[in-house]
Amino acid sequence: MGQETPKAKQARNNSLVVIDNRTGKRYSVPITRNSVPATFFKSIRAPAGPDDRPEDETERGLCISDRECLNTAVIEGAITYIDGERGILRYRGYPIEQPVEKSTFLECAYLLIYGALPARNQLFHFEREVLLHGIMHADATKCFGSFRYDSHPMAMLMTNPSLQGTYPHL
């Protein structure tokens, strides 16, 4: 673990010092909002060692491993805020329960796109736009109808862009 520096020598510096024992190089990683940028570690490079696999790409820089996302944070995001430990999930600042329980699907879509729930006239125009541009060709209906009843929704959704590419006039 870390060793404390005597108080007399400490100066507030929002950075983390990393020493790569493979190369002896010293790096200063900036700390912002109690986090360090994972991409910074890509600049910490070393020649491949005897135990490194080619897939490790050691010479291309360090990667950050957080297999269960237990210490991964999105520090700034305008759409979603998640604090799993405290059970908080917000979309655009609204507690998730509010849009789920009190808003329609299209109101939620509007919220995610524009950042606020729509006023009545905004919702009217948004619904019209979605209906006008949401036309699906009858053949596309057949395609989606051909999936097994227990197909995973994400696999079905991934098919959509390819399918739409076959209808350039829509």
Image (cartoon, grey):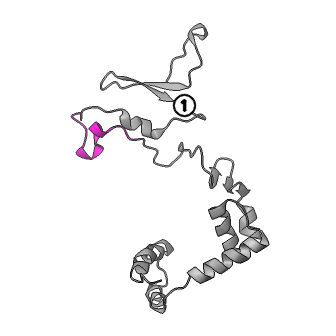
The residue furthest left is: 50
- Residue at 56 percent across and 9 percent down: it is 9
Give the answer, above or below, for where 148 lies relative to 72: below
Name the image quarter holding residue 103.
Answer: bottom right
Question: Secondary structure beneath disc 1?
Answer: loop
Question: Which residue is nearer to you in this view: 124 or 157?
Answer: 124
Q: How far across and how far down the image is residue 56, in percent?
A: 29, 43
Give the answer, above or below, for where 80 lies relative to 152: above
- Residue at 52 percent across and 26 percent down: it is 15
Magenta segment, prevailing SS (helix, strand or loop): loop
- Residue at 50 percent across and 22 percent down: it is 2
Task: Say what amino acid the circle numbered 1 marks.
Answer: Ile
Q: How many marks?
A: 1
Q: Badge 1 is on which residue?
A: 31
Q: How far across and how far down the image is residue 115, in percent?
A: 67, 59
As drawn, is 108 to the left or to the right of 165?
Answer: right
The residue furthest top is: 8
The magenta-colored residue range is 48-63
Q: How far across and how far down the image is residue 34, in percent?
A: 59, 34
Question: Which residue is nearer to you in this view: 73 or 149?
Answer: 73
Q: How far across and how far down the image is residue 70, in percent?
A: 54, 45
Q: Is residue 51 magenta?
A: yes
